[in-house]
Amino acid sequence: MNSLSLFKRSFAHGVHPDDHSEQTAHLPIQRVPFVSHYVLPLGQHLGAPAHTIIKVGARVQRGQLIAEPGAFVSTALHSPVTGWVRAIAPRRYPNGQLQSAIEIEADPYATQCLESKPPINWRSLSTDDFIKQVQQAGIVGMGGAAFPSHVKYALPEGLQIKHLVINGAECEPYLTNDHRLMLERPETVLQGIEIVRQKLNAEQATIGVELNKANAIAVLQKHIRQGQYQHIKVVPLRVKYPQGAEKMLIKSLFDTEIPAGQLPRDLGVTVNNVGTIVAIADYFQSGMPLIERIVTVSGPGVEQPANLIVPLGTPVREVLRFCGGLKQTTREVIMGGPMMGMPIASLDVPILKGSSGILAFTALETGKPKEYPCIRCGRCVEACPHFLNPSRLAKLAKVGWYEEMAQYNALDCVECGACTYSCPSGIPIVQLIKVGKAEIRKAKTKAAT
């Protein structure tokens, strides 16, 4: 099937929020200057927190390993700067909770240049060694979930990956960091894809990019032709949210649904974000672990929107200061995208591995709508890409009927927020479902102990 017929199709349901990409899509990536202090939470990825291997007072070099994986579903942590470890103690996380973290004071006289290392011969690595290298590099899913990338590459016996899918949809409004990566570093994107494809023995790699990034599609296709990447193709996709959810992306690309309770790998597919692929290429080509990432700073409340290279652990306050600060009308700052991101508890919380964006909003965007009774219009059902009944799940959550929520497949909800976005009654549907899911998991954990 040709790419033209593919992008005429998409997944069922979903919504079409304005993308608001005009603020930053045209802005080249800049580097934020180094600041004085950095805070590195040990649990900024899904799974077990990392275990610190350094002591307070120790001098560390930029890129040095400072915490090892705490389990298989965990990943390493490296210093983003040359400096001194000033504390290993609880620090404020973006959600407001305290979490163990390493605080580093940067050496103001250090060049902060990463020590040059020869490329790693990834072709000679066994699959197990490749997986260990990715884990030790601290690489996670850069789209926001921060799931340790090496776990996706560790396949149960008998499973074979046929398709490597690269998520270039970037369907969250305002965010343009993946867009800029595809435009500015297309060769690195393709090299990272080829590394992962060959190590997984995948037959084909497919980059899914929405049509509102036509220039990125053209640049990637040009480099594919020039570099003779015969196993990589770009597929343009219709613009729809949440196309970046991996099950939705797979449906759009291959017209294949991942059954409830199964993972993409069960059908021979692995999905990686563009930023993750670039991080893998950077590590194997130059030895740079994941110590910085691209962050989009945007929204009506920020003075100077930008796409920035930001060292991990940089306080949000310093990033915003580089962008001219916040407007007086700003009422809320969100880490991530407006649909799935979270309001941050303080401007002093750090940039994390999964921090794709910092968005500032005024009262006009953040005002809580007046909530009315559900009118049973069915719009949330039409919006839900997983064919759930969000209204029913929200009503069950309100009255605490969590077992019934589980029976109605509440755990299949990916919390994309399409239901809340589409609700004419202003009901915070996804927020209610999140509470219910947390209670369901709590009950399961209690029953298992």
Image: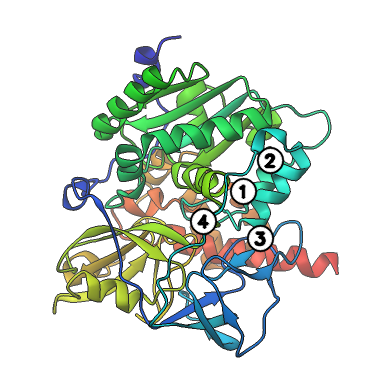
* Residue at image location 43% in from the left, 38% down from the top: 188
| Relative vertical location of residue 348 with respect to residue 402 in this rendering, above or below | below
**Mark 2: secondary structure:** helix
- Residue 382 at x, y percent in the picture: 40, 38
Q: Residue 99: tell me if it is visible.
A: no
Q: Is residue 59 among what the camera can see?
A: yes
Relative to 196, say whether 253 is above or below.
above
Q: Please give left or right for residue 377 compared with residue 443 in the image.
A: left
Q: Residue 75 carries which label?
A: 3
Which of these two is toward me, 302 or 293?
A: 293
Question: Which residue is label 2 attached to?
Answer: 153
- Amino acid at circle 3: Thr
Mark 3 is surrounded, within 10 Å at the Cα level, by few (under 14), some (14 to 19) or many (20 or more) other residues, namely many
Q: How far apart are marks 3 and 4 (CA)?
A: 23 Å
Q: Position of residue 407 (x, y in %)?
A: 67, 50
| Distance between mark 3 and mark 1 Cα atoms | 9 Å
Mark 4 or mark 2, which has the lower sequence index? 4
For label 1, the SS is: helix
Secondary structure state at the residue bearing disc 3: loop
| Left or right of residue 75, residue 272 in this image | left
> Which comes sooner in the sequence, label 4 or label 1?
4
Looking at the image, do the residues carrying marks 3 and 1 touch, with CB atoms under 8 Å apart?
A: yes
Quarter of the figure that contains the C terminus: bottom right
Which residue is under mark 4? 116
- The residue identified by callout 1 is 149
Q: Nearer the viewer, mark 3 or mark 4?
A: 4
In the depicted view, which residue is nearer to us: 116 or 140? 116
Quarter holding residue 48:
bottom right
